[in-house]
Amino acid sequence: MASTKRGLAFKGQFWIYDLPAVAGKAIASLSNTKPVIANALAHGLKTGDGIWIESETNSGINGYYLVDVSNEDTFAVIGLNGEDIGTVTDAKFAALECYMLCNVTDLKVDDLKTKENDDSTICDAGAHTSTSKDSGAISVSGIWNPDIKAQEILDELIQTTETLLFAYKPEKSTLKFGYQVVITNSSKQAKATEDWKFSMDGKINGTIRQVRVKADNQPTTKRGAK
């Protein structure tokens, strides 16, 4: 990524995603494997793309995912475990619009957090504790420029307070990581002699979506520049 004024950009690539205005395409079948294999005729996707999947009969699969494409009619849904979803016959998917956010300067991801629970009762002779998994977190900061379309889209998505999809790929890596995130905090600040800066924090919702992409197979950046 290119450098930003008064600092270097995040060493990697960072994307945000937005739902398209078009209706979703039908999925003929979803396998009961991990990850799920989706059959959708002429799906038009490529490995690393972000999608939204939904079903009226099984809303538990509704969410954002990355895809690993096998051929023009099938793709793996990265992040969706099909071992417990049963038979789903009404699933649809929509390819997300992708925006590269080039002004990111800092990124922190806490993939996993744990917490200690006090399970003691009045009948116990001593303390009893257990460890449980808590939601991970993501923090992003960078230079704020509202005239860049990607930043405009991000500001709009923050206002919805709904679950969003973020993804990043570290520099010199072929692994792309995706996260469903609920924004918990967003702020902007500036000083007289400096550029505006933004920061936001979010809670990771669900498992990590991780897929290996080729260097020449990155998602197309839409409206991501001035």
Image (cartoon, rainbow, N blue to C red):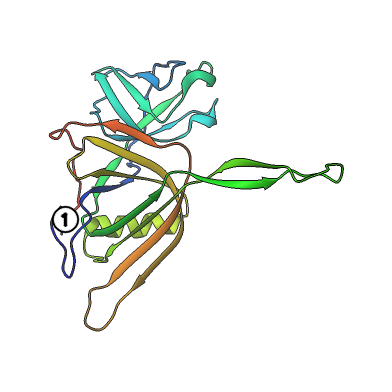
Image side of residue 10 versus residue 199, left or right: left
Q: Camera-side residue: 217 or 175?
A: 175
- Residue at the image position 32 percent from the left and 41 percent from the top: 20
- Residue at the image position 54 percent from the left and 26 percent from the top: 58
76 to 105, vertically: above or below: above
- Residue at the image position 33 percent from the left and 19 percent from the top: 40
In the orientation shown, which residue stands out farthest toward the front? 125
Query: Which residue bears the numbered disc 1?
Result: 225
On the image, the x and y values in percent for residue 60 come to 53, 31
- Residue at the image position 15 percent from the left and 52 percent from the top: 1
Q: Amino acid at mark 1?
A: Ala
On the image, the x and y values in percent for residue 75 come to 31, 21
Q: Camera-side residue: 164 or 116?
A: 116
Please identify the quadrant where the C terminus is shown. bottom left
Q: Camera-side residue: 171 or 66?
A: 171
Image side of residue 119 versus residue 6, left or right: right
On the image, the x and y values in percent for residue 8 come to 18, 61
196 to 26, vertically: above or below: below
In the orientation shown, which residue stands out farthest toward the right? 123
Q: Could you tell me which secondary element the residue under label 1 belongs to?
A: loop
